[in-house]
Image: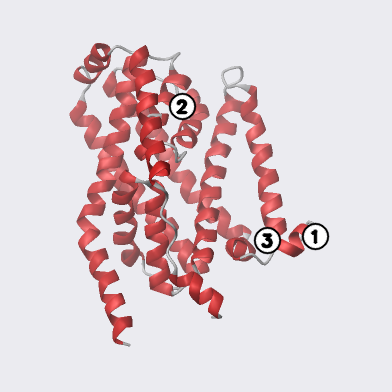
Amino acid sequence: MNDSATREATVPPKEPSRWARLIPLALTVVIFGIIFWRIPFQAFWEAVSGARLLPFFALMGSFSLCFFLADSAVLTALIRWFHGPIRYRELLPVRASTYVVAIINTQLAQAALALYLNRRFRTPLGEITSTVVLLILLEATNLIFFATLGSAAFPGGAPAVFFVLPAALALLWIIVLGIARGRLGPLGRRAGGNVLLSTFRKVRLRQGLAILVLKGSVFFLSLLVHARALTFFGIEIPVLPLLAFLPIVYLVAALPVTVAHLGTSQAAWIFFFGGYAAEADLLAYSLAAHLTFMLANGSFGLIFLPRVYADLFSRRTERADH
């Protein structure tokens, strides 16, 4: 490893400024302010009080566990392919601990994961970032695929603009892979060797399809879980609208603009499914589902957090001794 790569491998990412940290909090407050301006709190509380919460928590908690196990499997595969050997059970605590950090700040959770992999493999942070970006793009591809499938099967119910998304995504894949592999003329020749595109140079079609199959399986499970969990709040939404709009809800909720993705998720549920249930019921359901999923994953992280800290501390001690 040359000197520049060594420096990159050891320098942690810059922390965001105080103003940058306050923006998500401000947006979260504004979004909820608008939501509760439209929806009386009394109606929201009645929707929560009338829900069958015990079976709801049991179902959503079980799904959270399945998601955690599958999410860790995807991450394990990517690390093995592009960074080095690692056991699934070794990565489980690390992935769980990032869920705790994600409750506070999603970007901080990604940085924590990158730093762990940096210390575990001595891999430059740019290469790790490339793998994270690949995973994000594959996740977006998975959701846009199902959104397009649902929109096509639900004619007249989904905005026509949804069909622009798959074309834009395909173009993005062509551009990124073309540049990473030195194609597309001068741009590819100049930027193709960038460390942030390192994983895109290595990835193969079968690897991408394997990730999409696993992610697709998790999405189908979430579709079934939500279809059932909604009934515990007295809400009935047909499968086709769920298939068409749930991926878009996930995409909107994933935007790193609010605290713990709160606010955007609730607004998306109300916007896309407002024709199938009362807004207060949708707010109650989406907030309960979001908090249950977030707190369940956070609980997994708290269980494993001491082990992760001990692992990182022991590795630092070993390097210091050498």
- Residue 187 as seen in the image, left or right of residue 220: right
Q: Earlier in the sequence, mark 2 or mark 1?
A: 1
Q: Residues within 10 Å of mark 2 (few under 14, many from 20)?
A: many
Three-letter amino acid code of the residue under disc 1: Pro
Q: CA distance from mark 2 to mark 1?
A: 44 Å
In the rendered image, is residue 254 in sight? yes
User: Most extreme residue toward the right, as rendered?
Assistant: 185
Q: Quadrant of the N terminus?
A: bottom right
Q: Residues within 10 Å of mark 1 (few under 14, many from 20)?
A: few
User: Most extreme residue toward the bottom, as rendered?
Assistant: 322
Three-letter amino acid code of the residue under disc 2: Leu
Residue 152 or residue 6, whichever sits in front: 6
Which residue is the site of mark 3? Answer: 180
Three-letter amino acid code of the residue under disc 3: Ala
Q: Which mark is residue 119?
A: none
Which residue is drawn at the image coordinates 22% and 36% (left, top)?
A: 58
Q: Which mark is residue 242?
A: 2
In the rendered image, residue 289, in percent from the top left (x then y), is placed at 31, 32
Which residue is the site of mark 1? Answer: 186
Numbered disc in front, either 3 or 1: 1
Which residue is drawn at the image coordinates 64% and 37% (left, top)?
A: 166
Could you say whether the residue bearing mark 3 is in a helix, strand or loop?
Answer: helix
Which residue is drawn at the image coordinates 31% and 45% (left, top)?
A: 104
